[in-house]
Amino acid sequence: MAVAVAAMKQAPDLVLPSLTTGYILADLGIVQGTEFAGWDVSPLSLAESVPRQGVLPEEVWRARADLLSRTEIKKPPSSSLSLGEQVERLIHDLADFKTLYPGSRPVLVDLLPACGEADLGQFDRLEQLLEGADPSVMPDLPYAMAAVLSGVPVVNFTSNPVEAPAIVREAELRGVPLAGRDGKTGQTYFKVVLASALRARNLRVEGWYSLNILGNEDGRNLHEPGRAKGKIANKTQVLDGVLGYRVGEGREAPCHKVHIDYYPPRGDAKEAWDVIDFTGLFGLPMSLRVNLLARDSVLAAPLVIDLARWMIALQEAGRGGLVPELAFYFKRPLGQDPPLRFQDQLRALERLGEQCRRRR
Ligand SMILES: NC(=O)c1ccc[n+]([C@@H]2O[C@H](COP(=O)([O-])OP(=O)(O)OC[C@H]3O[C@@H](n4cnc5c(N)ncnc54)[C@H](O)[C@@H]3O)[C@@H](O)[C@H]2O)c1
């Protein structure tokens, strides 16, 4: 992500063709002006961390090493502070970033690791959140609160359910857009495309078996079942919504199965297999295999940049609260009646682009 932003500053034509907003929001502003900053618990600087992650070949990051070493990465607030104190510290940090980049239009993108089970659904008011929520369960919470209170839009790229009713309400009142949840980068993206195509031809899906192997930090974290639960639920729920029926209805055991397995040798080069069993005329069975050989971060970085650009356009157009029209980008799209089928998601995105252009 940091390398993609650095590359955009030096040579936008290297990155722009990989963005959806390259054509939908073509008039948004000078892409070379995009800056990257943030927080990380890691003691390593970005310039040290990028080669260690081994995601990009040396010739790609080396040319941007200078820009990486100048990127401002702050230490997160100590976890020994109360939620309110953490929020205050982060509001202060956000103000610092705004001073560092005068005239900027900041967006907060949540890229924290998947957390364990958490439910903030009972918190309707900020005061209740501050009193009752435990930030050690979901470290994303102080970031989202600080951003909304600072008028900064939030993209939730994680599976963590940080969108408490109190946060959504505050974002609506303040005209701050919120987008989420859980970036739809690889297997689930193609699942939505294929399921939409099968549905359009009235081919009935009888079963869908999905397996992912990945060996990066995200994979290691998701190895813990409690942390993978939210993501597996998002990956599973998506299918019935697209098809309009529950796959395997009437059978004893689930017929849509999703597994995520941590497999270190693959690093960021994740692999996914899908076995799709479906029937056609006279109920005769057919089957399809998909084997995706992808790069997790290479798929994710353009989406993160796209979403940051959408947030700026939406805020300028006076839009606040959840944005279901951005369902194209998420496994678990939030907001009222998000489009579920691929063709509806793409159409909603294009319409949203037109609305932004008209209102700006
Ligand atoms: N293709 C994708 O990469 C993809 C797709 C969909 C969703 N996601 C989600 O996006 C998130 C990021 O993915 P990733 O592959 O970059 O994960 P990662 O584990 O490589 O990166 C997480 C980063 O967060 C930092 N961090 C941990 N706790 C922190 C805290 N309290 N404050 C600040 N920083 C903290 C870590 O040091 C690390 O640098 C994950 O939740 C992942 O599930 C990723």
Image (cartoon, rainbow, N blue to C red):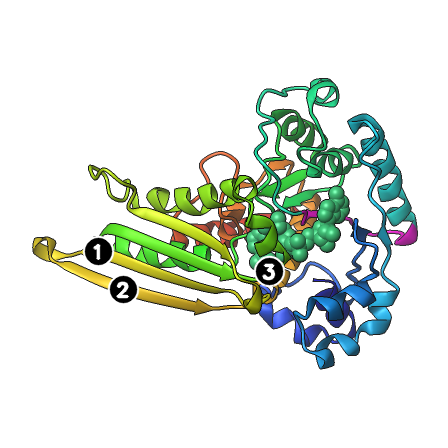
Please report contact status of discs 1 and 3: CB closer than 8 Å, yes or no.
no
Q: Residue at x 74, y 76 (%)?
A: 11
Q: Residue at x 70, y 27 (%)?
A: 134
Q: Is residue 134 left or right of residue 280?
A: right
- Which secondary structure, mark 1? strand
Residue linked to disc 3: 300
- Which secondary structure, mark 2? strand
Magenta part of the chain: 100-112
Please report contact status of discs 2 and 1: CB closer than 8 Å, yes or no.
yes
Direction bottom: furthest residue: 59
Marking on residue 221:
none
Image coords of residue 358 (percent x, y) = 61, 49
- Which secondary structure, mark 3? helix
204 is within the stretch colored magenta: no
Residue 54 vertical position relative to residue 203 in the rendered view, above or below: below
**Dot placed on the residue nearer the N-terminal end, 2 or 1:** 1
Marking on residue 278:
1
Image coords of residue 360 (percent x, y) = 68, 48
Image coords of residue 315 (percent x, y) = 69, 43
On the rendered image, what quadrant is the N terminus found in? bottom right
Q: Residues within 10 Å of mark 1 (few under 14, many from 20)?
A: some
Q: Residue at x 21, y 53 (%)?
A: 202
Q: Residue 23, located in which quarter of the rendered image?
A: bottom right
105 is within the stretch colored magenta: yes
Residue linked to disc 2: 288
Query: Which-is-in-front pick, marks 3 and 2?
Result: 2
Name the residue nearer the viewer: 201 or 28: 201
Name the residue nearer the viewer: 283 or 262: 262
Name the residue nearer the viewer: 213 or 196: 213
Residue 340 vertical position relative to residue 14 in the rendered view, above or below: above
